[in-house]
Amino acid sequence: MSTSTDLTLPEGAPEEVITQALLRPIDLTPFGFKGTLALITLDNGLDHTRPNTFGAKSLAALNASISAAIATAPAAIAITGKPFIFAAGADLSALAFLSKREQSLAIGKLGHDVFRRLGEIEIPTFSFINGLALGGGLEVGLHCNYRTLSSTAFTGLPEVFLGLVPGWGGATLLPQLIGPEKAVQVIMLNALNNNTMMKAKDALTLGVVDAVYEPADFLEKSVAFAASVLSGATKIERKDFSNDPAWDSALATGRAAALKKYGGAEIAAPTRALKLIAESKTATRSSGFDAEDQALADLTMADPLRASLYAFNLIQKKRKKVEGAPKPALGRKVTKVGVVGAGLMASQLALLFVRNLKCPVVMTDIDQARADKGVAWVHAELAKLVEKRRMSKESADRLSALVSGSADQSVFAGCDFVIEAIFEELSLKQELFKKLENIVSPECVLATNTSSLSVQAMSQGLKNPERVVGFHFFNPVAIMPLLEVARTEHTDDATTATAVTVGKELKKTMVITKDAPGFVVNRLLTRFMGEITDAMDEGTPPEIADNAMRSIGFPMSPFELLGLVGPGVALHVSETLNKNLGPRYKISPTMQAMVKGGIRTFYIKDDKGAFVANPEAVALIVAGNKASTAEEVRSRALTALAEEARMMLDEGVVATPAEIDLCMLLGAGWPMHLGGILPYLDREGISEAVCAKRFHQPGIASLP
């Protein structure tokens, strides 16, 4: 086989941080076997914040080390990583610079040629996975004959999540190792479930690894495991899955999961991954690896991969750094939190605050019974975490003791941060803040979880309007990662810095927005939804209007989203934005009728459990005679999004197009494979057609 490293990366590609492959012999005699283990340690020379990765030069270094190890005639070869890190796979930073399919093929083949040596030499090989192992990092281990794993390590194959396939052996070797059902779980289902990684116990149960050891003596135990295998004391049986009856059902499960994730659209990465898994049933290493090379080359030469990587990198970057945030040192310490309201949203907020800030959280409502109900909900949720073994009983008891409720707002005295989650009525919120101002200190932050009302209007007439800030969460609070922090003209840096610090402690990704109607997500979603409902009210059949965006991979249709949000909330936001931004924000008579009639969802389950249109909702549609096609509905919806996004940037609602992309990815479920809303509009030519210019420079989330 070829082990050539003669690969020229595109001009302008970033310098590779080379992962060296350091070789040392280990005498196995003390472990009960007479012989030497050649141990290769992957180490890029940086701290654990920069994981080992594989570019062309790193692969060459590993190749050379394997050759040097073989030359010492050892009893076996093992590969491990630097402290806390095994390897995070391919150096994806170079992918955006690939301009020719041949280059991608060469990188795929180079990885295969190097890694497969570990599975095809005549002596046993071991992988001691001492830390994080993702993608190509796990695939190195799959090429070895045996694998051990640190009990604290996480592993996974995230490629399908990123728009790729496990292309350095994973799609071929894993199904042959653990069978089709488990391979579909690891390669497809985990990846599609927001890139879920395997804990050590999961990897062991699935058969991905052969043994798990604690980190304190992981290397020593792994070497002892290797000696035991070599001596014959430990035998690892491998099963032949080529005749497993579960192949068809496993592949059907993977296909169904992909269709559900992308709203019925056929997306390239999961489709190719399933094809490779299916072929692995009868594939040889050479045929399987060749098919992986072809799949990788096709995917890396298409826009969805660039789009996914843009979205992924954007999320990672903005999770760490909030655009426009004041210096953290300006923030004030938060030792007690108040939550005004004890309904579901307020209770979710109380739970989030107490779990992450671990400080006293006091809730209030109009009477003690309601306040007690909110506190009881928080306690019940903590108890559920104990039942699910996600929290110890001792921890839950400590947190439960920190949550209290009252009908008397004087309990907010001593709070450093108070957030309201009461009914969306401006006058009520104004009255509330005036009451709170006489209870809390002048430095206490007053935050509102409003979705569309003016934050500045809430602060009108206050003695300290500078400490009022929008703090808009998305439902469900514990799951949705986005937090919109809305500054008014008066909000000072100390308040904003405190809010951002609290948001980070809550583990949220934040965007600082101008105090504008609907902020970012609700403004765009409401404009988009208005075009869909308007088309339906004009006479477009509801199933055509609702499914117009399915073809591009939305996991949820507009009317399904409506059922999640609630028609009442959606109508209120529409009315607020219509009042503040004008008639381009449509108020649907059908939506008004649904709210008036108390109908909460457009879809219901039939006798067989399938979702069908709710006859009560359909009966309320007063349709005109101006029906549109699905393409016409899609075009008008995307046109509206482009118009609104351009206006938002011109108004300074956020500072950059990337922040709009981030908000829609994390707050509205915009598909990762589209790379953010604005790059998609750019690629489709909608930006230039509607706004006469692109939102991003050419090459962002697309082929250069």
Image: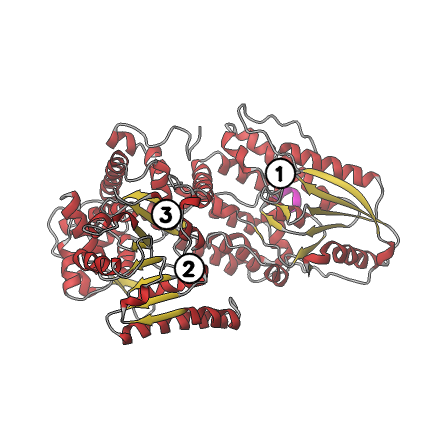
Residue placed most toward the observer, 145 or 589: 589
Give the residue at mark 3.
553
Residue placed most toward the observer, 209 or 287: 209
Q: Secondary structure at mark 2?
A: loop
Q: How is the image coloured?
A: secondary structure
Q: Is residue 139 above or below residue 151?
A: above
Q: Amino acid at mark 2?
A: Thr
Q: Which residues are magenta?
A: 283-288
Q: Which mark is residue 313?
A: none
Give the residue displayed 54% in from the left and 54% down from the top.
Answer: 197
Q: Residue 64 in the image: x percent, y percent? A: 74, 35
Q: Is residue 676 above or below residue 541?
A: above
Q: Residue 426 in the image: x percent, y percent? A: 18, 55
Q: Which mark is residue 54?
A: 1
**Within the magenta stretch, is there residue 128?**
no
Quadrant location of the C terminus?
top left
Q: Is residue 173 above or below residue 347?
A: above
Q: Which mark is residue 335?
A: 2
Q: Secondary structure at mark 3?
A: loop
Give the residue displayed 11% in from the left and 50% down from the top.
Answer: 624
The numbered mark, 1 or 3, whose residue comes first in the sequence reads 1
Between the C-alphas of marks 3 and 2, the distance is 44 Å
